[in-house]
Amino acid sequence: MNWGIILSISKTHLLSRLKQSGTAALGVTFGIGTFIILVSFMTGLNNLLDGLILNRTPHIHIYNEIKPSEKQPIDYASEFSNAFNVVHSIKPKFSQERIHNAIPLMDHLKSDERVRGVTPLVRAQAFYSAGSLQINGILNGVDILEESRLFKLDDYIFEGDAQALKRTSNGILMGIGVAKKLSLKIGDNVQIISSKGDVFQLKLVGFYQSGLAEIDNAQSYINLKTAQQVLGEGQSYITDINVKLNKLEDAVPMAMEIERNFNLTAIDIKEANAQFETGTSIRNIITYAVSITLLIVAGFGIYNILNMLIYEKMNDIAILKATGFSGRDVKYIFITQAMLIGLTGGLLGLIFGYGISVLIDHTPFETEALPTVKTFPVNWNPVYYFIGIAFAIISTFLAGYLPARRAERIDPVEIIRGQ
């Protein structure tokens, strides 16, 4: 078998019917290009929506939940052990909101190879005061640099930065909603009234916007030590511990392990965001279902074009067989044509898809809910481009193989007689 002759004949057939060959190649081009554009944009948008929640959510949230005692005093009385006891007006048991031995617990968690990072949190209820106006708020005392590293807080700060809060011991990073209500700007002093009635002067060092109005209208970040001072507590006072893991699947078993070993409440990310995870799964299913359907439709279009091309080449097939080419040679000629169309159309499809994706990535997308997002999101995962070119080659091979087998079995005498 002379592959040079087969390739030469295939090129001659394609160039002699340049319009049909170009139409087939463009079918591949637009099918693959549209697939890349759709899947890159949709997965990029899904990643953006996921990031709004998952970037700001710890994999495990540890705190000391205030709840009633599971056993009441009557349950300890032996004479009532076999009775059905009903206790009314049960009150929560006396316990501190703080996590006992929080610092040793954090050190223990940091030593675990499953853990990527641990951040302490001191949550304080307070009022933002401006003259006679007082707005209810929440102060989150954090290690701001660790908070930025693990939870990408910098992505939500659109004026000022995390370093400014770290440098300013009495600094405050305010939600944009409450800052607008108080008509504040960077450098202004903010008066805070604690739940105990103590007044503190803090310096505004930046604004952040989470995209959730109920959070931006109340929540602010301050340094951990400042939050402890607002509550009148010592340096060991910590109300919450947030944990980021190397692998998300470790969250559920590790949360159960923490609750069992330390008698604390540990909420894993799947429990905290069950509804969101369901929505993400549905969006991904829709994205990939539409993308696969698009590829299948493109594949049928390629098959139809190549099938018609073979019918138009009946005379050529008869001549080839009459001059000594075997049915197998004829089959390879048409498969080679299909592969050339697929390869050319696929490469053009990658270029087309990449070009449109670049345009989407540079298209302005401005919303008050996401101040740090300036353009539409695009996922540049190279896997999508590999899938695109692989499908182009495989689909054109299959689309060419079926008609080529028919051409292999054609009797040249019948064709010539019909002429």
Image (tube, grey):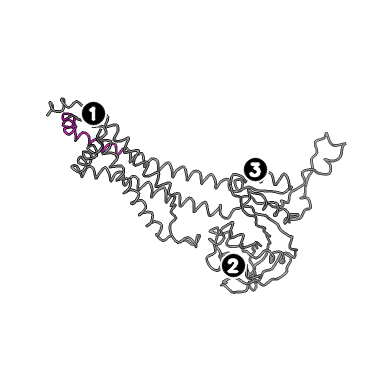
Report how far apart the C-alphas of labels 1 and 2 lie in the structure. Answer: 75 Å
Q: Secondary structure at mark 1?
A: helix
User: For residue 413, which quarter of the picture?
Assistant: top left
Of callouts 3 and 2, the N-terminal one: 2
The disc at residue 327 is 1
- x and y, in percent, of residue 408 in the image: 24, 29
Q: Are there few (<14), some (14-19), or many (20+) residues within 10 Å of tag 3? A: few
Q: Secondary structure at mark 3?
A: helix
Report how far apart the C-alphas of labels 1 and 3 lie in the structure. Answer: 63 Å
Q: Which residue is mark 2?
A: 163
Residue shown at the point (44%, 55%) measured from the top left = 377
Name the kind of residue labelled 3 in the image: Pro
Name the kind of residue labelled 2 in the image: Gln
The residues colored magenta run: 300-323
Of callouts 1 and 2, the N-terminal one: 2
User: For residue 73, which quarter of the picture?
Assistant: top right
Residue shown at the point (22%, 37%) measured from the top left = 5
User: For residue 228, which quarter of the picture?
Assistant: bottom right
Q: Secondary structure at mark 2?
A: helix
Report how far apart the C-alphas of labels 3 and 2 lie in the structure. Answer: 35 Å
Name the kind of residue labelled 1 in the image: Gly
Q: Is residue 74 left or right of residue 407?
A: right
Magenta segment's dominant SS is: helix
Relative to the observer, which residue lies in front, 108 or 47? Answer: 108
- x and y, in percent, of residue 414 in the image: 16, 25
The disc at residue 253 is 3
Q: Quadrant of the N terminus?
A: top left
Does the residue at mark 1 contact the one at mark 3 (Cβ under 8 Å)? no
